[in-house]
Amino acid sequence: MDIYCGLDSGGTKTRCVLADEGGRMLGIGESGPSNYLFCSKEMASHSIKESIQKAFYYANREPVSLKCSYIASAAIEVNNGASHIPFISTCVDTQLIHANSDAVPVWFAVARKNPAIVTISGTGSVTYAFWEDNFIKSGGWGALFGDEGSGYDIGRRAINASSRVQDGRENHTCILEAIYRHFKIADIRELHYILRNGDQRSIVASAAICVIELYKKGNVLAAEILKTASKELFLAIQTVLDRAGFEKDVPLILSGGLLKDELPLNHMLHQMLQEEKSISKIVTPQVPIAASAAAMALYENGKRSSSELLLEESKGKEQ
């Protein structure tokens, strides 16, 4: 029996989904980070291999050579996977291999390859207009140059506000207290030591939860930070819509940890987009990226009905 593989190669964790040629999910495995823009290739290789091993273990099968694998990663630019395959092929025992941006399976899970907008806000942020084999991109410049509306952006603003309060330049004591509790510190200067011993982007982005919790309690500063983030995402959406010039209305797909249905950034974007007539509907993906990547492995290998079955089976699975 041929086995197909989808990999979500993330900055925090790597997830592998194995499926058979009929589109039945066999096993799921998870490991550490493998986005080699922000971790070593040695770490990425270990995480990818371990996630596949665990997926075979939970499928109750001995590891075998895979028929086709699809790797999705923020380390890969859209339609530029070929340059990454030499490295990935050292990590995955597979006959055929495809690699692309993690935004592509997000698009595929909802719209297949029909025109759509994809906005992602997690540790980083990026927005795409997709149609057929074409795309337009806004954002995604990384923490040093951009990532407006991302967890990093929100977390950095929260930490900056906290430092100003600690100095006495502002009096929003709630944000300072929240940051102290979150990082288990008694002085903002202690953050420098924490940042030296981990992934700085993820550590800073983790502070976004402080802003979300304060917003739920009616905190004015938290509302300002989230409103600024939502405006940046809204601007990116408008930009790709204008540049793409679609003849028909298209769906907007909101993905990433900060754009889940129950979170305030999602609600704010919905409100801002009420008058945007070029958007036919706003949806959040119900299929995890690794499962959608496995479905794309089937799709690219001519197993389109099996791809559809896997997508249907994967709906509602834990992201």
Image (cartoon, grey):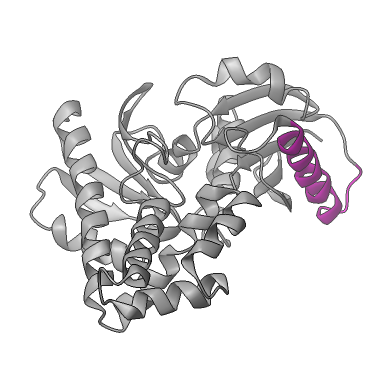
Quadrant position of residue 229: bottom left
The picture places residue 188, in percent across and down from the top left corner, at 47, 66
Count of numbered tags = 0
Q: Nearer the viewer, residue 133 or 19?
A: 133
Front-most of residues 62 and 2 = 62
| Residue 199 on the magenta segment | no
Estimate the x, y position of residue 59 in percent, counting from the top left: 81, 52
Residue at the image point whose x is 20% and y is 27% from the top: 244
Residue drawn where x is 84% and y is 29% of the image = 65
Q: Is residue 47 above or below residue 188?
A: above
Q: Is residue 59 magenta?
A: yes
Vertical placement of 50 versus 284: above or below?
Answer: above
Q: Quarter holding the N terminus?
A: top right
- Indicate left or right for 35 with 58 as reference: left
Res. 309 in view: no
Q: Is residue 60 left or right of residue 4?
A: right
Residue 27 x/y as whole percent: 75, 52
Task: Give residue 238's position: percent from left, percent from top.
Answer: 16, 40
101 or 312: which is nearer to us? 101
Q: Give the answer, above or below, for where 270 lies relative to 120.
A: below
Q: In this rendering, does residue 285 appear at all? A: yes
The answer to whether 157 is drawn above or below residue 298 in the figure is below
Q: Which residues are magenta?
A: 42-62
